[in-house]
Image (tube, helix red, strand yellow):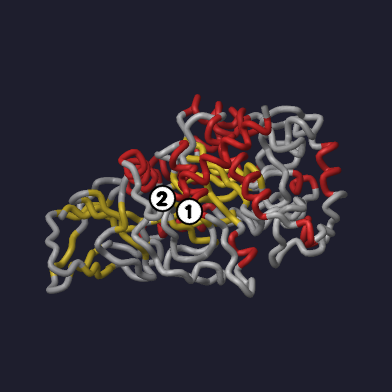
């Protein structure tokens, strides 16, 4: 049965690859893209065997743990505090509209049952529960979309062709077999897209492992992307490759930066016309770190969300669940603060696009139809010039109270009379054009 299933996947991938030289998104896919842009806020969850080590998700390669020793962590993986419904309830209360979870990270361990081997949470741990299945069911019950992170690289599998990371894990380089590994990935992707209901997106990571190869490495993305779109046409594809998007991709990802910024050195690519997403950490790590209490303040996180929206992007905010399955209390505190703010100001974020006023040091704008929301995040004066060009303003009011705001018209825009210097996390002015 297992061999038959794998053979079918290989045939499907080959046929789709030959047929799809140019990507033409379906109507379902285009609809999903718009919904994605409307959602604006998601939560990223990095969780796996590495969480047990408490030093982040790169521990296997950072500590050069042997590929035959690392899987022994699975023998004691038993996250007794894991409750998918509680996770989803807390995340939904934050105002997030979707969850992206690591189904399989670079260490190769799968948080779902798979026919490709026993190195997974059901067959290889005493927990014996399909975490992705439970989370998928909870997301469907509570009306949250589920996106699935999937690693393109693997520090533990012998058939994965070695790149520039994971070189100290002891894998024999001569056993690399791309055809075998590619088939393994596509088999798992088929499982994820046929066993867990509707999937909002597949979020790839790891392409960059071969970005320094003397000869360009062919990941055969065209066939893989076609397989995904065949199985679930609405499923969006994003790839955290730090490059301009390739054909077949539906969203563009920016890591640790907003579009157009490159402070972290990972997001220097040009901005495409695809829906945009910025992934950011809530503290300093992606996976759980027992010593990392450097959580960003509610103000920093809310302003990050607002600036992302002003740049026409979603914010995917990462949390590293604890090894026992609980979400860290400091993370939950931040989620509650964001949720409280979105309860009041969500209408200026959800369903909007980046406004006609470009981002400035003082803040950004978002827009829906003739409503332009001026988000003042850092203003040092009681008045503020808003460059509107030839656009005419019919009214200006304080969004939180509805109080009318006086303004002076000029040739290139208006000057708002705010009365006092704003001190809010985000002082929002609603302009009707």
Q: Which residue is mark 2?
A: 20
Left or right of 152? Residue 119 is: right
The residue lying furthest to the top in this view is 141
> Would residue 292 be visible to someone looking at this image?
no
Percent position (x, y) of residue 409? 13, 68
Name the disc covering residue 222, or none.
Answer: 1
First reached walking from the N terminus: tag 1 or tag 2: 2
Q: Residue at x 30, y 40 (%)?
A: 27
Label 1, label 2: how many angstroms apart (C-alpha)?
Answer: 7 Å
The kind of secondary structure element at disc 2 is loop
Nearest the viewer among 44 and 339 is: 44
Q: Residue at x 73, y 53 (%)?
A: 159
In x, y percent, where is residue 239?
51, 55
Circle 1 SS class: helix
The residue located at (66%, 35%) in the rendering is 112
Specify the quadrant of the image occupied by residue 309.
bottom left
Q: Is residue 364 visible?
A: yes
Q: Give the crowd class for mark 2: few <14, some 14-19, many >=20 residues within 10 Å.
A: some
Residue 202: percent from the left, percent from the top? 52, 45
Q: What is the x, y in percent for residue 38?
A: 35, 45
x 25%, y 49%: residue: 368
Whether 58 is drawn above or below 74: the answer is below
Q: Is residue 396 above or below residue 29?
A: below
């Amino acid at each position: 049965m297992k061999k038959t299933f794998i053979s079918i996947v290989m045939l499907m991938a080959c046929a789709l690859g030959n047929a799809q030289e140019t990507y033409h998104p379906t109507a379902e896919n285009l609809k999903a893209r718009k919904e994605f842009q409307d959602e604006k806020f998601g939560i990223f969850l990095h969780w796996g065997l590495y969480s047990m080590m408490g030093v982040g998700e790169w521990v296997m390669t950072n500590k050069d743990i042997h590929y035959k020793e690392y899987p022994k962590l699975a023998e004691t993986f038993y996250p007794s505090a894991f409750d998918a419904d509680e996770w989803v309830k807390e995340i939904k209360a934050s105002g997030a509209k979707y969850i992206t979870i690591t189904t399989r990270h670079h260490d190769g361990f799968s948080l779902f049952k798979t026919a490709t081997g026993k190195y997974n949470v059901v067959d290889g741990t005493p927990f014996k529960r399909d975490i992705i299945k439970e989370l998928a069911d909870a997301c469907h019950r509570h009306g949250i979309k589920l996106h699935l992170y999937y690693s393109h690289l693997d520090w533990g599998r012998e058939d994965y062709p070695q790149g520039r990371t994971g070189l100290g894990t002891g894998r024999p380089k001569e056993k690399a077999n791309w055809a075998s590994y590619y088939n393994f990935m596509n088999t798992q992707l088929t499982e994820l897209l046929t066993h867990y209901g509707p999937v909002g997106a597949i979020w790839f990571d790891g392409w960059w492992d071969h970005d320094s190869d003397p000869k360009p490495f062919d990941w055969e993305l065209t066939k893989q992307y076609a397989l995904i779109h065949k199985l679930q046409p609405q499923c969006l594809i994003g790839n955290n490759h730090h490059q301009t998007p390739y054909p077949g991709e539906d969203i563009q990802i920016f890591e640790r930066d907003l579009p157009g910024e490159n402070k972290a050195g990972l997001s220097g690519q040009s901005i495409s016309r695809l829906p945009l997403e910025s992934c950011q950490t809530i503290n300093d790590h992606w996976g759980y770190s027992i010593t990392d209490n450097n959580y960003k303040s509610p103000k920093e996180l809310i302003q990050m969300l607002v600036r992302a929206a002003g740049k026409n992007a979603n914010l995917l905010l990462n949390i590293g669940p604890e090894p026992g399955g609980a979400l860290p209390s400091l993370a939950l505190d931040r989620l509650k603060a964001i949720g409280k703010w979105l309860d009041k100001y969500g209408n200026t974020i959800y369903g909007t696009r980046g406004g006609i006023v470009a981002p400035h040091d003082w803040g950004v704008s978002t827009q829906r139809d003739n409503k332009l929301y001026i988000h003042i995040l850092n203003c040092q004066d009681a008045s503020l010039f808003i460059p509107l060009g030839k656009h005419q303003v019919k009214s200006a009011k304080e969004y939180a109270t509805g109080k009318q705001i006086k303004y002076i018209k000029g040739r290139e825009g208006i000057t708002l009379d705010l009365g006092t210097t704003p001190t809010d996390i985000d002082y929002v002015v609603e302009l009707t054009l």
